[in-house]
Structure formats: C-alpha cells, structure tokens
Amino acid sequence: MKGYVQVYTGNGKGKTTAALGLALRAAGAGLRVFIAQFAKGGQYSEIKALSRFEDLITVRQFGAGGFISGQPSQEDRDSAGRGLAAIRASMASGSYDVVILDEANIATWYNLISPEELLSVIDGRPPQVELIITGRNAHEKILARADIVTEMRELKHYFSAGVQAREGIEL
C-alpha cells in the first residue's frame, strides 16, 4: 500500500485526537504504528490507553515535560533531536506502517527542530509509510509537501471561559 503525508494543524482542538484515532484504526487493521510526541512528557491518558496495544503501537515522548509558551530549554532541543533520530530509525527499520509525529509543527515553531529537518524526515520516508504530522503553526514548506492538510479551526472553546484541561478529555 502506498503511504501519504498528512498534516493536522490549526488553532482548534482535535489534532492529536485525530492522529490517535488514525493510530487506533490502523492497529485495528493490523498495521504497526510508531508515535513520537514532541514537546510532551508525562503520563497523558492516551499513553495509558495505547499501552494496551503495545504489540502494534509504540509511543515515545521527546519532550522535557511539555512547555506551551516561552523559550524551550537545551534539554527540550536535545530531546527533539533524539526524537528525529528515533523517527528516522523507525522508518528505516521497516517495522512500522504508520509514523505519527505529534506536535512536530510546534517543534519547528519553537525552533526545537528546523523545518528543513522535518522536510528531510518527509523526504526519507519509505513510500509505503503513512506519515502524520500534527501541531498548530505548520510551516508553509511542510504544508506544501503534504498530500493531505486538515486545519482545525476554533470557533468556540470553553478554555476561554476558564475551564481547565480535563483528564480523559484534553489530558
């Protein structure tokens, strides 16, 4: 099966959720999935749930705890570099059918990795691997290279009314 490059971006909720839904669908079809999470670290609910599918879905985090504003630390940049190496190795191994780069667009936005490094991952993708890249602020070069681009647009969100992230829904 030919693989494609998909990008889920925009300011609306649902980018990671869409990618995780695709991972679940792929696993249901017996496909093997590698998920690399940039700028995230910790036991999010999806990590707990996906551990039940560890025979088909591998999740690795390449973040020092999850910053969402400000300047990343050197530890954040080093972790993102390790993430790129792990992604390249996972694709080269032939062990995975779907590779998800969760929050990779944010990683380029905050200069954890360069757009050129992300483009080199796209260029190095074996033709049968489906590659999904999530995160707001997708770089125009990434958008141009993708086969599918979905923009999540916020029309209304309860965060603006002060509702905090809820376990099992946002966390």
Image (cartoon, helix red, strand yellow):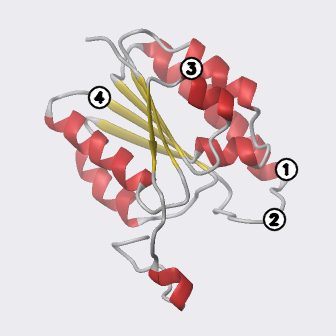
Q: CA distance from mark 4 to mark 2?
A: 35 Å
Q: CA distance from mark 3 to mark 1?
A: 25 Å
The residue at the point 45 percent across, 83 percent down is 158
Q: CA distance from mark 3 to mark 2?
A: 28 Å
Q: Nearer the viewer, mark 3 or mark 1?
A: 3
Res. 65 visible in picture: yes
The kind of secondary structure element at disc 2 is: loop
* Mark count: 4
The residue at the point 41 percent across, 9 percent down is 127
Q: Amino acid at mark 1?
A: Gln
Q: Residue furthest front?
A: 155
Q: CA distance from mark 1 to mark 4?
A: 32 Å
* Residue 129 position in % (x across, y down): 38, 18
Q: State which quarter of the image contains the C terminus.
A: bottom left
Q: Nearer the viewer, mark 4 or mark 2?
A: 2
Closer to us: 39 or 153: 153
Characterize the local packing of mark 1: few (<14), some (14-19) or many (20 or more) Cα atoms within 10 angstroms.
Answer: few
Indicate which disc, 3 or 2, sits on the residue closer to the N terminus.
2
* Residue 121 position in % (x across, y down): 60, 21
Q: Nearer the viewer, mark 4 or mark 3?
A: 3
Residue ID for mark 3: 122
Q: Nearer the viewer, mark 2 or mark 1?
A: 2
Residue ID for mark 2: 70
Task: Say whether residue 23 is left or right of residue 159.
Answer: left
The kind of secondary structure element at disc 3 is: helix
